[in-house]
Image: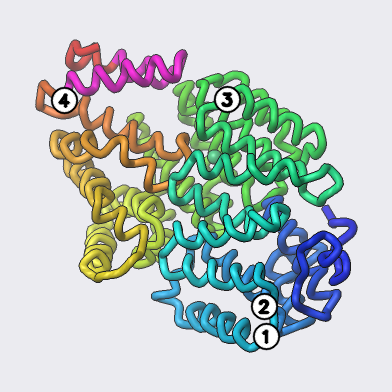
Amino acid sequence: MAFSGLRDCKAWLDSGLELTTHSNEACKMYDAAVRQYTTWHNDATLGGLEGCISRIKEADPNFVMGHVFENGLKLIGTGHSVLLDEEFARSIKSTIELAKKQSITKRERLHVSAVDLFSRGSLPEACSLWESILLDHPTDLVALKFLHDTYFYLGWQQQMRDSIVRVLPHWKPEIPLYSNVKGMLSFGLVETNFYDQAEKVAKEALAMNPLDAWSVHAVAHVHEMKAEVEKGLVFMESTENDWKDSDMLACHNYWHWALYFIEKGEYETALSIYDNHISSGCFKSGTMLDVVDTCSMLYRLQMEGVNVGNRWKKLVKVTKQHIRDHLLVFNDLHILMSLLGSKDKESCDQLIGTLKEHLREPGENHQFTIAKQFGIHLYEAFIAYEEGNYSEAVELLYPIRYDIVKIGGSNAQRDVFNQLLIHSALNSVNKEHHKIARCLLMERDILRPNSPLTKRLIQRATAIHGVA
Ligand SMILES: [Fe+2]
């Protein structure tokens, strides 16, 4: 997929998004990088995202937006901590210094500040700056995508949806990546339970560009949220050739595919997708999206009573590299799943210990605030469940269940926490918890009808405790 019409200095200026550089090559490679980020596809003919970023810096080492994009992308990836990576911290600092020395636009200056804020854990404040940019420049895709992705991490679902809704009228079909922006709208719609609209918008986007892996993903979510297992399976199989080469998202789309098989109770098929596409993708890329999917898939299978063999042991080699990151509570919890799954108590203690050190520090880090408010109970609940203290896991999880959205991720991804609470309540020795299990299963059955997984849990509840 080579991109046509990459924009030079004049083309960026004409589109109202002036870039402070005299290098047409830097501008074109910046365009190529943004397009790859948005389409979730490393284009080998361009050297992938990394190749383009190198070429931007070669063409103009002083191009501020090139540095902003490189640092922002690394931050949005949530796999690099500026607290642990001195070179990364220096890169952000030197970008700020570079910006001070130059006469750049107000928009570019806001970008520099937004990335700086994100790097210091001030995610809501970074969003405010990207919002400011979009008020005057609604087609600034870097601001839009960074904003959209950060709202996702914050669990601010309505803001994630509306960030696209309010700029979309300014986007015209001839603007590059128009259909991808529609795909982003579709995802915002599905996360705020507008399933029919989400599917319609995603299908419109796919009619314009069938290779849009993010719009495929939005449809996968619609089928997941409606427990339309067979429709989901047909859709993923029939579109696989269109999205399997979107290397940054393929693993996640396969994860969605495998979820349908878990729903059906076809665990061997889910494991086969895990082995052939999910864990293999994760081991290759090491990106946090792939890491969390891999952990989540094994944990879900394990809760279903599946023996996942030595897969945790293999996976923990990747996850252990991130036990001190603490960039997102959401990521931490998935890493914790793998440490518990592989019975690596030492690493588990390190993860919890280093997190608690951060929580004792003063500061405005949003994720640490979330962890202090309620997130820490999630970590403790996983440990309690692992130790067979199901009653304690319920006591920890049940009071905070409506807060969990604030750790970010999608509704489908966070379902692992819903399932953990239900399993804890079913396994608890406390009879009050059995009533909670019944209530949770009734909620689940009504909100997501015809889910085979829910039916199995209801059957189990009836068989074990006579509660359903
Ligand atoms: Fe997803």
Please state which of the two labelled residues, at mark 4 or mark 3, is closer to the viewer: 3
Q: Mark 2 points at which residue?
A: 64
Task: Indicate whether residue 447 is drawn in magenta.
Answer: yes
Determine the CA span between mark 4 and mark 3. 32 Å
Q: Main secondary structure of the magenta part?
A: helix
Please state which of the two labelled residues, at mark 2 or mark 3, is closer to the viewer: 2
Q: Which residue is drawn at 38% across and 48% down?
A: 407
Task: Indicate whether residue 204 is drawn in magenta.
Answer: no
Q: Which of marks 2 and 4 is nearer the N terminus?
A: 2
Residue type at mark 2? Val
Residue 118 position (above or below residue 466)? below
Please state which of the two labelled residues, at mark 1 or mark 2, is closer to the viewer: 1
| SS class, disc 2 | helix
**Label 1 with label 2: CB-CB less than 8 Å:** yes
Comparing 427 with 18, the one in front is 18
Tag shown at residue 433: 4
Q: In the drawing, does residue 410 fall left or right of residue 210?
A: left
Residue type at mark 4? His
Determine the CA span between mark 2 and mark 3. 40 Å
The magenta segment: 433-459
Q: Which residue is drawn at 58% across and 71% down?
A: 71
Please state which of the two labelled residues, at mark 4 or mark 1, is closer to the viewer: 1
| SS class, disc 1 | loop
| Neighbour tally class for label 1: few under 14, some 14-19, many 20 plus, Cα within 10 Å | few
Confirm if mark 2 falls within 8 A of ligand 1. no
**Label 3 with label 1: CB-CB less than 8 Å:** no
Ligand 1, image quadrant it occupies: top right
Q: Residue at x 57, y 55 (%)?
A: 131
Determine the CA span between mark 4 and mark 1. 62 Å
Residue 361 x/y as whole percent: 24, 70
Residue 267 x/y as whole percent: 46, 29
